[in-house]
């Protein structure tokens, strides 16, 4: 486990960053914001639209926020984004608790959370850009990309990297275990020394005979299998 510890620690740190990012993106009301054309604000008030609430401010009045009365009043991309971002949070939490033999599961869940974060953010971003450049859409309905979308893209990148590192750590650990298991079997056959040196055939036969007379049980620390040598 020591040879994979740096990878494990790095993945753990990035995992917590990814968790913070997904929670922040889900909670932030700045998915879609007021649009500007040149130096002019299209609407007379500053608007923020998120997954759970919208906020507005007129002139020097303090910004006010209101939770949506119903999920059905949201456009379909925001409805889907709300569900997918909640799934992302759950997947990242489960991944953070994945250790040892479940590293493969944790890495796979990180990659899945990468998709469930990237898809809603990109979907909303595509919709905002399409409406902004659509001449048939009224100016008052046009919006720009909010900070939450940029944070979402960055977070999805962190989750992707975390998943790759976790799977790489798992792969290295399995290769070390298999190498150790193979060496122990070769030693049990009397063909190799503890340092992996090949013995002459005569010495190998003598060592096998000695082992057969003085057999003892050796437990593999990695695979937890006991066998006789």
Image (spheres, rainbow, N blue to C red):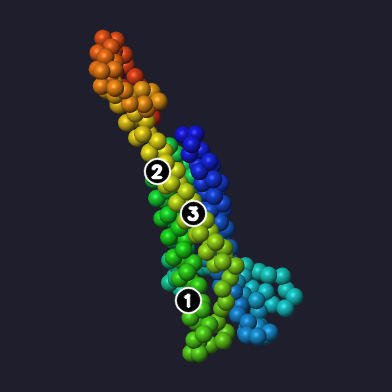
> Depth-wise, is mark 2 or mark 1 nearer the camera?
2
Q: Residues within 10 Å of mark 3 (few under 14, many from 20)?
A: some
| Quadrant occupied by the C terminus | top left
Q: Which mark is residue 142?
A: none
Q: Residue at x 46, y 34 (%)?
A: 1
Q: Residues within 10 Å of mark 1 (few under 14, many from 20)?
A: few
| Residue 12 seen in the current view | no
Q: Which residue is mark 1?
A: 127
Q: Is residue 47 left or right of residue 106?
A: right
Q: In this orientation, which residue lies closer to the viewer: 139 or 106?
A: 106
Image spot of residue 124 (x, y percent): 48, 71
Q: In this orientation, which residue lies closer to the viewer: 46 or 71?
A: 46
Q: Residue at x 42, y 54 (%)?
A: 111
> Depth-wise, is mark 2 or mark 3 nearer the camera?
2
**Mark 2 falls on what kind of element?**
helix
Q: Which residue is mark 3?
A: 161
Image spot of residue 100 (x, y percent): 43, 37
């Amino acid at each position: 486990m020591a040879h994979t510890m740096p990878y494990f620690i790095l993945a753990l740190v990035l995992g917590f960053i990814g968790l913070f990012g997904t929670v922040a993106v889900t909670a932030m009301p700045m998915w879609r914001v007021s649009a500007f054309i040149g130096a002019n604000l299209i609407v007379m008030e500053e608007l923020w639209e998120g997954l759970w609430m919208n906020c507005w401010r007129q002139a020097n009045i303090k910004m006010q926020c209101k939770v949506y009365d119903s999920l059905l009043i949201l456009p379909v991309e925001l409805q889907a984004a709300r569900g997918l971002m909640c799934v992302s949070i759950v997947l990242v939490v489960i991944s953070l608790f994945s250790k040892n033999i479940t590293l493969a599961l944790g890495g796979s869940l990180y990659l899945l959370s990468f998709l469930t974060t990237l898809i809603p953010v990109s979907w909303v971003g595509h919709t905002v850009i399409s409406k902004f450049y659509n001449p048939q859409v009224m100016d008052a309905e046009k919006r720009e990309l909010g900070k939450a979308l940029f944070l979402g893209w960055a977070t999805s990148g962190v989750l992707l990297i975390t998943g790759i590192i976790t799977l790489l750590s798992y792969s290295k650990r399995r290769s070390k275990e298999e190498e150790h298991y193979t060496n122990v079997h070769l030693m049990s056959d009397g063909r190799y020394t503890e340092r992996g040196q090949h013995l002459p055939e005569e010495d190998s036969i003598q060592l096998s005979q000695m082992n057969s007379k003085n057999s003892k049980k050796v437990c593999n620390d990695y695979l937890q299998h006991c066998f006789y040598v």
